[in-house]
Amino acid sequence: MARAQSRYVCQSCGASVLRWEGQCRTCGEWNTLVETVVRETPRANSRSVVTAGADPVPLTHAGEADAEVRRPVGIGELDRVLGGGLVAGSLVLLGGEPGIGKSTLLLQVAAGVAAAGGEILYATGEESATQVRLRASRLGLTGAPVGDAIRVVAETGVGRITELARGARPALLVVDSVQTVASEELDGPPGSVGQVREATLRLMELAKADDIPVVLVGHVTKDGTLAGPKTLEHLVDVVLAIEGDRTGGLRLLRASKNRYGSTEEVGVFEMGDRGLTEVADPARAFLAEHDAPAPGSVVAPILEGSRPLLVEVQALVAPTSAPSPRRTASGVDPNRLALLVAVLGRRAGIALGSHDVYANLAGGLSVTEPGLDLPLALALASSLRDRPLVAGTVAIGEVGLLGELRGVGGLDRRLREAARLGFSRAVVPRSRGRGDSRLPGLDLVEVGSLADAIRVSLAGALT
Ligand SMILES: [Zn+2]
């Protein structure tokens, strides 16, 4: 039975009942009833950026009065992703797998804000205050004045956390994590859909009303989605995600949503003893080191936002007698992999129908851009033929169903970066009307089809 001030609301159709039930009686959906606090005035509008009763203003002057106040956090790569710093009154969700470095990054952010003279309230439900201090001291962040400006509280009641923040008016409130905080008004356990949603709404209200930037930590489940309600990402202003291979050192920080800036920029970090440090040369950070060119390995100049990165696509194909061979993709789109296997077989004479296929990106990266088609296809062909690519080669391009190649955006920027990092040959789709984009030291090989690309790319005798 719900408490007097709570109801169970169907997330599918909005029907509201007093008791939890497995199936919604109104729409018939299963497991959609979520405990929700009943309010006189619905708070759903709190995420509206529109002020009631505003007068129309000329477009040229619109919004001038409420230009955002940004506070740089002192970590260049993070400020870059945020679009210049934390905006006052914004609610930021930082997601990532357990152990990837979320708490570490946030302690560093807290230290950055503290170093600029701000006070921080750090509410931890994941670890005790002692554990937070030990972590901070490992990172070398406990010295005065920084260590004194960060106030830690081990607290999971969202009411108490907002009360403390209203009293202390910190320059930043960190809540680690949204899955551990809970409201007294609901019966559900911390981490339940209702609790996560309610806690987020309460913190959003605090951020907006008191102009305090709030950063929430959110855990990510095995399948890569944020644990908790799907609506969580819609409620907050900014969604950041840390990716990377937990066992490796590299981390990529991305914004999948940013109400105050671009979602195009990525930050590249390296995890070490002193926490996350910025990488001196991000473009080459994700390249694996090889003594000699290896079959199944292709370097691709991808574009993450405005930043060119060189990544290594790796593929392994192995004969199998299983009726349905494996297609395993990590960091690349499994649907694209399946499609490329089909196109290779029909249009390029690379038959993989009786082979297991594995493909991944070095460094734990995950990339969805279509330009990865050609390098992935070349890696598969290279592995099947057991022949490496011609040394010093990069490749980029989208592959069509007919085996034709299509161009990608920002080719010049990608190639310039490849040339800078010492690559001498680029296999790219043929295109008309490209200006003079030849770069000194880079041999541009333009091809029209996947079959041609394979022919010019693999080292050794012609196929
Ligand atoms: Zn329903």
Image (spheres, grey):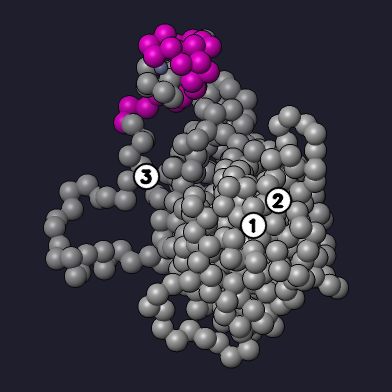
Which residue is label 1 attached to? Answer: 376
Percent x, y of residue 411: 50, 74
Name the one closer to the observer, 409 or 138: 409
Percent x, y of residue 268: 65, 67
121 part of magenta stretch: no
CA gap, disc 3 and disc 2: 41 Å
Asked whether mark 1 lies closer than 8 Å to ligand 1, one says no
Viewer-side label of 3, 2: 2
Is mark 1 in CB contact (under 8 Å) with mark 2? yes
Q: Quadrant of residue 70?
A: bottom left
Q: Please tell me which residue is depicted at 59% across the width and 61% down the height of the picture.
A: 451
Magenta stretch: dominant secondary structure = loop
Asked whether mark 2 lies closer than 8 Å to ligand 1, one says no
Neighbour tally class for label 1: few under 14, some 14-19, many 20 plus, Cα within 10 Å: many
Q: Amino acid at mark 2?
A: Ala
Q: Please tell me which residue is depicted at 68% across the width and 47% down the height of the picture.
A: 351
Q: Any mark on residue 359, and which?
A: 2
| Quadrant that contains the C terminus | bottom right
The quadrant of the picture showing ligand 1 is top left
Residue numbers of the magenta segment = 16-41
Percent x, y of residue 29: 46, 16
Is residue 119 placed above or below 43 in the rendered structure?
A: below
- Is residue 343 visible in the rendered image? The answer is yes
Is residue 419 placed above or below 339 in the rendered structure?
A: below
CA gap, disc 1 and disc 3: 41 Å
Q: Residue furthest right?
A: 291
Which residue is label 3 attached to? Answer: 47
Neighbour tally class for label 2: few under 14, some 14-19, many 20 plus, Cα within 10 Å: many
Q: Earlier in the sequence, mark 1 or mark 3?
A: 3
